[in-house]
Amino acid sequence: MDLFIKHEHSELIAKLRKWEHAYHTMDAPIVDDATYDAARTRAREIEAQYPELSGADTAVGAKISSSFKTQKHSTPMLSIRDIFTKEELSDWIKRCGVDDFWIEPKVDGLAFVVRYEDGKLVQALTRGDGTTGEDITENIKTILDIPHTISHKDNIEIRGEVYMSHEQFFALNAAAEKSGGKIFANPRNAAAGSLRQLDAKITASRGLRAFVYTWGGGDRMWETQSEFFDFAEKLGFKTTKHWCRRCLNIDEIQAHYDYVNDIRSDIPFDIDGMVVKVNDVRMQIALGATANAPRWSVAYKFPAARAITHIKDITIQVGRTGVLTPVAELDPINIGGVMVARATLHNADEIARKNFRIGDKVIVQRAGDVIPQVVESIEHAPNSTPYEFPSVCPICGGDVLQDDGKVARRCVNAYGCSAQLLGRLEHFVSRKGFDIEGLGPRQLELFVANGWIKSPADIFTLIANYQLPITNLDGFGAKSVANLDAAINSRKAIDLHRVIYAIGIPEVGDATAKMLARTYGTMENLRTQSAIQLTALDGIGEVMANEIVKFFADENNKKILDDLLSHLEIRRGVLHTPAGGGTPPLHGKKVVITGTLKNYTRDALRDLLEGMGAKVQSSVSAKTDILIAGENAGSKLADAERLGVMIWDEQELENKIK
């Protein structure tokens, strides 16, 4: 045997072991998926050429943590062999010798198995090293998608994947960034870290979800993989059936793979490929498995959502509140089919903690259409030095300060910084604010650069004061200026909650703005509230209350707001009240919307319900009062039925409104 090949294989195995330990055990990856896949594929190629090296274990696995009780699996939880091309898929299909397949998303989470005896959940284990898993029974019980009891009374094991949705992942990291907690690199690691907590209360707070995809033991009542999904859903489990398909040949498999890859960014959780399975269970049994993987299944991987590139420069963006956000200017790289040239570095503390430098070779990740982020520095450039965060604003030269207890650094020149002005104006005219058609970032940038808009009030005198010079700008004819004037005038009569949101009070988002509008009814009432009075409201803490009071106490804000109000006719905040006064009809009710409605957009219905006093939420729980279910309602409808939540269809909703 070539000694060079033997040495290469030995180094690959050592790297794989190191990377797998970081990924599976420490929940902290040190290389991107593409790098790992390439090394693993190369190791297999060498083993295929030199079978004497195949004794080295290249199966994916995790070292078992000593913090958990452990137990051997009744049958091993094998890994699935990865393929990356249609040619590899064709070779696998020929070896299987069948023409009936089931293709399902490969959810990027943490594998688990749950065991039921006499219909009761008695134990849950992680995959661990495939032979032995960690006991996570109490933690798994906190996940809404895992029923504690099922109607199937025979002993059975169900296997699946715990995951974290994109929405929950971003919320978790945002909260951690504010509190100085751990920032997770991706939803998979956030899910793994959350599930493998010694305190089940922490797991319960993380909003984990779960899909099931196969069984591990017990009597079988189904003949195909697709029938198993039906069986699992009848027991109350969630599956990825919505994105699955039965296929009869390679072209159908490829077509569905391409379709799911195209809509991948719209799927609310991470997937990194499609699992292709022989559909007939008897054929699965006949094909059997190798020591590491089943022969009847492969993972057809998508293009990597992570990649390696270099930081060419680090620039600073200044937001509407003055916060300085560092941005990595990258050598452009294709990540999952999208060219990425810029990625966030979060803040000064993150740069220092991970020692990002100009010239670094780095891992960059992109999930859906979320802003790309730099995850890890792999290698510093020669003679590079630590990055020095600016002490003055790069836009206006104003001082940069860091508030006590906060990671953000802020330009203090709030009213003389053009970047802050532009950010505030973009927020002001955004969809949830004044929503002025034809007045977007490009137009605002032009008007601010010419000195025509210096505050929100100037928007309402813009055409009267500068109609002729505006028509002389490229892209602005007489008709477009007239349309812009009409759009601006149409927003002079506006709901109070839109004004509260648009003026940009720190910490106050759309939902809080609506709650404040309902509670106080007028801007005058809101402006006079003390922090103590504000914290008495449900959902307003001390930090938010202090920000609201501070905003209205600022002399510059007072003048800007008074100038704005002189142009507006504000509709009162309580939009729907019973005849003769009293509380709104849905006061305090927790409502969730799912599916497609014929007569309402999602935003319009949210506004209507919140105007009637409801609290519109994104997910169903035992505390939900009402689920409004349109057509094609998905898992939320099943959750509501299981939890006994009141369900209204669109006709029932119309009746209640009337």
Image: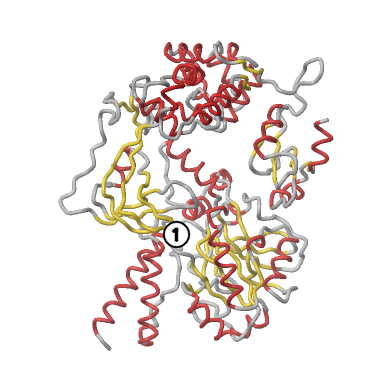
Determine the image quadrant of residue 450: top left
Q: Position of residue 484 (x, y in %)?
A: 53, 27
Rate crowding at label 1 as few (under 14), some (14 to 19) or many (20 or more) other CA atoms within 10 Å: few
Task: Determine whether 630 is above or below 452 in the image.
Answer: below
Q: Residue 571, how many percent across, how many down?
A: 65, 18
- Residue drawn at 36 percent across, 37 percent down: 325
Residue placed under numbered mark 1 in the picture: 337
Type of the residue with mark 1: Gly
> Toward which corner of the image does residue 7 lie, by quadrant?
bottom left
The answer to which of 404 and 81 lies nearer the viewer is 81
Most foreground residue, 643 or 491:
491
Asked whether residue 433 is in view, the answer is no
Asked if residue 37 lies left or right of residue 515, the reply is left
Q: Quadrant of the N terminus?
A: bottom left
Q: Nearer the viewer, residue 597 or 193?
A: 597
Mark 1 residue element:
loop
> Quadrant where the C terminus lies?
top right
Q: Residue furthest left?
A: 383
The residue drawn where x is 53% and y is 25% is: 502
Would you place residue 58 above or below residue 625 in this image? below
